[in-house]
Image (cartoon, rainbow, N blue to C red):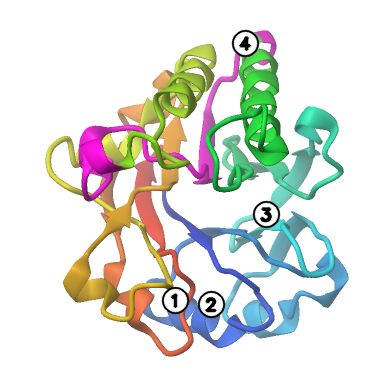
Amino acid sequence: MSFTLATWNINSVRLRAPLVQRLMEEDAPDVLCLQECKSPVEKIPVELFQALGYTHMIGRGQKGYNGVAILSKLPIEETASEDFAALGHARHIAGRLSNGVTVHNFYIPAGGDEPNREINEKFGQKLDYLTELRDYFHAQKPEKAILVGDLNIAPREDDVWDHKKLLKIVSHTPIEVEHLAQVQDSGAWVDVTRQDIPQGLLYSWWSYRAKDWDGADKGRRLDHIWATPDISNAAHSSRIRRDARGWEKPSDHAPVFATFDL
């Protein structure tokens, strides 16, 4: 069985429902994981997506903040929704697809502006979230699983537009990169995107502050698709739909795709 999965920080699923519809119509991923839905689950416009074949959905929502959802053409059964670091935020949802694959969808805290937990509570929350996530997967020992989402960290030097300039910028600091590496090691997760595209600059996010985001191209790869080793070799055709960042009233993130032959 072959299926395609996409992950996208949509930055308000109700405001950008037409963009979600466009992606469904043009790319038709079998599973679409959304972050920063900014909506209670019951107010997500599911009828629009059901008409395009996405008849299954699981999610966690909040009014105006956070929120994660998995829209699927395949049946999916919710298996977990964890509140790491006890933040009271809707940042995680997991479900098992009809093919036996478990999908974890995450929206990791951004961490504020200052990379110092002593003066920035949000940065400390981000590190604590990642630490608890590491421990969770270390205890769980996941198999036949995929982890996706806006992880809010660009770990590699070629995941940012300028490695040296961003070393002290939240999302690329050494301590964040190390914490993310520990999460990855805890489940032996394979970075599917970089497995497929091992070399070269690669971004999934461009700031709203840059009017000419495409020309300036000061991006970061904040959005990820990982898989456990037992299925990572089945992954292929990874790509980032960069042009979606230029659609009308866009998210500042672009969708990331991978296909799995299982």
Q: Which residue is mark 2?
A: 20
- Of marks 3 and 2, which one's residue comes earlier in the chain? 2
What separation in Å lies between label 2 and label 4 (alpha carbons)? 34 Å
Local SS, label 3: loop
Placement of 41 over or under 123, stated as above or below: below
Q: Amino acid at mark 1?
A: Leu
Question: From which residue to which does the magenta span run?
Answer: 139-165
Q: In which quadrant of the rendered view does residue 50 lie? A: bottom right
Callout 3 amino acid: Pro
| Identity of the residue drawn at 78% across and 29% down | 85
- Indicate left or right for 84 with 211 as reference: right
The numbered dot on residue 138 is 4
Whole-angstrom CA distance, mark 1 to mark 4, is 35 Å
Q: Residues within 10 Å of mark 2 (few under 14, many from 20)?
A: some
On whether residue 142 falls in the magenta region, the answer is yes
The mark nearer the N terminus, 1 or 4, is: 1
Disc 2 residue type (three-letter): Val
Of labels 3 and 2, the one closer to you: 2
Q: Which residue is mark 1?
A: 23
Closer to the chain start, of discs 2 and 4, is: 2
| Image height of 142 relative to 168, above or below | above
Q: CA distance from mark 2 to mark 1?
A: 5 Å
Q: Decide whether residue 19 is among the magenta residues.
A: no
Q: Helix, strand, or loop for circle 2? A: helix
Q: Relative to residue 175, is residue 234 drawn left or right?
A: left
Report the mark closest to the observer, 1 or 4: 4
Q: Which residue is mark 3?
A: 75
Return the residue nearer the eye: 61 or 238.
Answer: 61
Q: Nearer the viewer, residue 89 or 70?
A: 89
Q: CA distance from mark 4 to mark 3?
A: 28 Å
